[in-house]
Amino acid sequence: MSSIEDYPFLPPPPGQMSNFENPETRAPAIIIICSTCIALMWPIFLLRIYAKVWISHAFGWDDGQSTGPRGWIFAKI
């Protein structure tokens, strides 16, 4: 028995077919883009922390505000 949830709300545009068995996905591209951005972010972030702590000796409250949540988020990943 089929329910109303098995049917699309609107028909596809003329000249296109709906593919519910194997739909097109953009997940691999999104994973690659996010991984690249994270890989570029980490060295820059670590250089900033290095410069603030060991070079300028000016690690302030604003740096703690930005590094604490960031470290917590990436520890969960």
Image: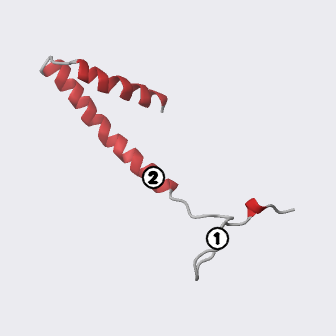
Residue 15, position in %: x, y? 58, 82
Q: Name which quarter of the figure residue 12 lies in.
A: bottom right
Q: Earlier in the sequence, mark 1 or mark 2?
A: 1
Alpha carbons under labels 1 and 2: distance apart: 27 Å
Residue position for label 1: 10
Above or below — where is 51 with respect to 44? above
24 vs 7, nearest the viewer = 7
Contact? badges 1 and 2 (CB < 8 Å): no
Q: Nearer the viewer, mark 1 or mark 2?
A: 1
Q: Is residue 47 above or below residue 4?
A: above
| Residue at 13 percent of width and 21 percent of height | 55
Q: Secondary structure at mark 2?
A: helix
Circle 2 is placed at which residue position?
30
Residue at the farthest bottom position: 15
Seen at 31% across and 35% down, the residue is 42
- Assign the N terminus to one quadrant of the image: bottom right
Amino acid type of the residue that numbered disc 2 sits on in the rendered structure:
Ile
The residue nearer to you, when weighing 38 against 72, is 72
The kind of residue tagged 1 is Leu
The dot on residue 45 is none
User: Residue 35, how many percent across, how many down?
Assistant: 40, 45
Q: Nearer the viewer, residue 42 or 20?
A: 20
Specify few, some or many for label 2: CA neighbours under 10 Å numbering under 14, 14-19, or 20 or more: few
Which residue is rendered at x = 61% and y = 64% of the image?
23
**Is 53 displayed left or right of 33 in the figure?**
left
